[in-house]
Amino acid sequence: MKTSIKLSGLVAAVLMATAGSSFAADPVVPYVTNTTDKVVVNSTGLCWRTGFWTPALAEQGGPDGAGCTCDKDILSAGACEPPAAPVEEPKVAKVTLSADTLFAFDSAKLSSDGAAMLDQLVSRMAGMDVEVILTTGYADRLGDEAYNQKLSEKRADAVKAYLTEKGVSPDLVQTEGRGEADAVVECPDPARNGEIKNVQDLVKCLAPNRRAVIEVIGTRSVQ
């Protein structure tokens, strides 16, 4: 086992003085150094320790310190290990936006409120290494099924177009229209004695189904 040489008494004092060091130095240096701050070693390559040497002081320099060069084999486990690199954690930001906020009823034209919400989303993506953005548009059950499918696709495309205008690479954005699928709420047809009495009530009830779901998948460094 490699062992540094520990100085004591007068010998340590003489060598410290020769090196221009001081026992009052802050922080305390556990090894004798020369005028260029290099650790003094003997003819066999062992480091000279000062009378102040302790394992804790030897470890204070970290992986690049003199302790890990001179006494790595006797220091605590991990004392000379380099710090772990920042961890890349997967991040998924899933945002569900009401289509009535993004678009007017039966429309794929982005509203001003919808644009503001997408602006916030773009801001939240800053500093994130985005892998893909999944944009899915939906419609309610009112109207023809084929028409609603097209409408949901147009809504998803409108979101992609806006994100692209804001600097998001179009290659990162994938769109899909799901038409009337995956309904959030079920609403009965209007009835005179029911809670939904007319078409206007039904349109209002079905609002949660008219939506856009945006999933941002990527990573952000965790220091």
Image (spheres, rainbow, N blue to C red):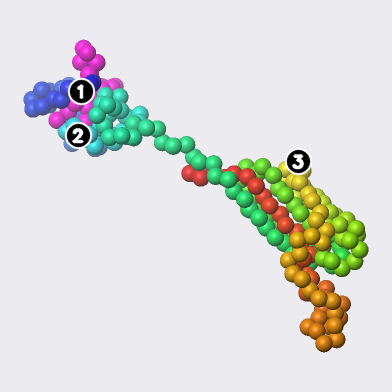
Instruction: Decide: is 165 above or below 4.
Output: below
Q: Nearer the viewer, mark 3 or mark 2?
A: 3
- The secondary structure that dominates the magenta segment is loop
Q: Whole-percent x and y of residue 3?
A: 21, 22
Q: Nearer the viewer, residue 110 or 205?
A: 205
* Quarter holding residue 7: top left
* Quarter holding residue 51: top left
The kind of secondary structure element at disc 2 is loop
Residue at image coords 72%, 57%:
213
Q: Report the span colored magenta.
A: 29-51
User: What amino acid type is highlighted by mark number 2?
Assistant: Thr
User: What amino acid type is highlighted by mark number 3?
Assistant: Asp
Q: What distance separates the C-alpha of mark 3 from that of mark 2?
A: 58 Å
Mark 3 and mark 2 in contact? Answer it, CB < 8 Å.
no
The kind of secondary structure element at disc 3 is helix
Mark 3 and mark 1 in contact? Answer it, CB < 8 Å.
no
Magenta highlight on residue 36: yes
Residue at image coords 67%, 58%:
95
Q: Could you tell which of marks 3 and 2 lies nearer the N-terminus?
A: 2
User: What amino acid type is highlighted by mark number 1?
Assistant: Ser
Magenta highlight on residue 204: no
Residue 110 visible at all: no
